[in-house]
Image (cartoon, rainbow, N blue to C red):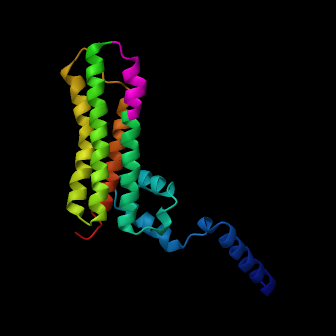
Amino acid sequence: MGSTGLLFLFLLMSLLQFFHPQLVLVSGDYDLIQKTCRSTKYYDLCISSLKSDPNSPNADTKGLAMIMVGIGEANATAISSYLSSELLGSANDTSMKKILKECVNRYTYSSDALQASLQSLAMEAYDYAYVHVIAAADYPNACRNAFKRCPRLAYPPELGPREDGLKHLCDVVLGIINLLDW
């Protein structure tokens, strides 16, 4: 490549950096995301989740954990809202309504536990952050168990994938917390 080609390439990269700084990533930033996600149970979920957040390329490992906790918290809140608006609103059976309200509460507790995990991460209390994430992953079990206590009511099939998604997000967070020095 001649000097004109090199000059053109340099100008193009400079313009990209000036107009779209988020498009030009330092390879080390993406390397940290990949390395971090390799330590988790769900690599693809970790990569796609962190790529969806514009702060990820500039984050350290603790920051990546905090981003994933925020994604998990948003997920738990969305499930709670879904249960409140979609399922609870259409339920006619009083037992079903009671169980769905319990489920709403459990997913709210899950969101609260993830919020507490964020606070613990910020204070570098990684052991507490870990315990809060475990609790957040476990709260949905109480919802599923409520349905088991009332065998005439079926566990809503659309809730299963949402529950699994939250648990997988929590597993990713736990894998990242394990990388932190504690």
Residue at figure coordinates x 27%, y 45% from the top left: 136
Depth check: 112 or 146 in front? 112
Compared with 25, 67 (above or below) is above
Residue furthest bottom in the image: 3
Q: Could you tell me residue 102's position as x and y percent?
A: 26, 28
Query: In the image, is 91 to the left or to the right of 20?
Result: left
Q: Could you tell me residue 164's position as x and y percent?
A: 34, 39
Q: Could you tell me residue 3's position as x and y percent?
A: 78, 87
- Residue 87 magenta-drawn? yes
Image quarter where the C terminus lies is bottom left
Query: In the image, is 118 to the left or to the right of 3?
Result: left
Residue at figure coordinates x 31%, y 51% from the top left: 115
Depth check: 128 or 144 in front? 128
Compared with 126, 73 (above or below) is above
Q: Which residues are magenta?
A: 81-92
Query: In the image, is 42 to the left or to the right of 127?
Result: right
Residue at figure coordinates x 27%, y 48% from the top left: 113
Quarter location, residue 46: bottom left
Q: Could you tell me residue 61's position as x and y percent?
A: 37, 67
Query: In the image, is 56 to the left or to the right of 3?
Result: left
Depth check: 56 or 35 in front? 56
